[in-house]
Amino acid sequence: MRKPRSVIGGFFVRAVLWLAPALALWYWARDYVVMPVAWLAESLMRYFFPGWVSGSELNGINQTLLTRLTVPYVSGQIAELAPDVSVLTYCYGLPLLVALFLAVRAKGLWWKLPVCAVGLLPFQAWGVCFAWLIPVAVKSGPYTRSITYFTDWDVNLIGLGYQIGFLLLPTLAPMLMWMYLERSFVITVAVEGAMEGSVP
């Protein structure tokens, strides 16, 4: 007798198959994907550090933070510190979320995707902001501390925030949103996993 296809196995296959076109569409629209993230990241930096942040410039998917901080070069010249970040690096949670929704044939995509896309913005901006803070507080800390007033404790927190924003939030945030909105499917998968584990 043929064994019924596993819910978990079917979901995994569909998710992988949907991820490729979702990533392709995401990369094709990359210049538009990064715009709201770039705007929010700049707004947060200007709000929290008005004393030394003067704005930012977005060139494609790369965003440069404009500061009033100066650092010396080996040649002896002084230059303004302007850290550059690839914003798209922190936005791959969006195509992952799309693939997960399509893999479970989710209903209500017309409102779930926009709501989740907006909900991901703070987490994506987190990554961009802390990527900017690393060269300011860590790499150039001895030269910028007199203006930024970052303490050793602040530098450690910034390092932790960067690791969270780079390694954790881009995948964890969309996964948690998907699990919350597709609770019935998650429960079904959990029940099936428990039943398979109980069968010798």
Image (spheres, rainbow, N blue to C red):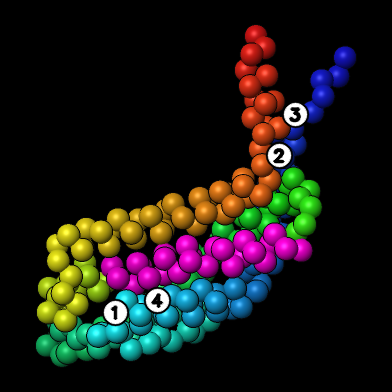
Q: What residue sits 62% from the left and 47% below the top?
A: 180
The spot of residue 5 in percent (x, y) is 79, 28
Q: Which residue is mark 4?
A: 44
Are the residues flagged by discs 1 and 3 in contact, CB closer than 8 Å?
A: no
Measured along the vertical axis of the image, is residue 199 above or below residue 62?
Answer: above
The picture quadrant where one finds residue 86 is bottom left
Q: Report how far apart the C-alphas of labels 4 and 1 lie in the structure.
A: 8 Å
Find disc 2 in the rendering and name its residue: 184
Say left or right for 144 vs 93: left
Amino acid carrying mark 2 in the image = Ser
User: Which residue is rendered at x = 35% and y = 67% of the image?
Assistant: 130
Numbered range of the magenta stretch:
110-134
Residue 43 in the image: above or below residue 152: below
Q: Main secondary structure of the magenta part?
A: helix
Q: Earlier in the sequence, mark 4 or mark 2?
A: 4
Q: Locate the C terminus by quadrant.
A: top right
User: Pointers 4 and 3 in contact (CB under 8 A)?
Assistant: no
Given this view, does label 2 or label 3 mark the residue nearer the observer? 2
Let me know if residue 126 is in the magenta part: yes
Is residue 84 placed above or below 164 in the rendered structure? Answer: below
Find numbered disc 3 in the image and state the secondary structure of the residue it sits on. loop
Mark 3 surroundings: few (<14), some (14-19) or many (≥20) residues within 10 A:
few
Give the residue pinned by disc 3. 6
| Circle 3: residue type | Ser
Q: Earlier in the sequence, mark 1 or mark 2?
A: 1
Mark yes or no: residue 23 visible. Answer: no
> Tag 3 or tag 1, which sits nearer the N-term?
3
Residue 49's disc number: 1
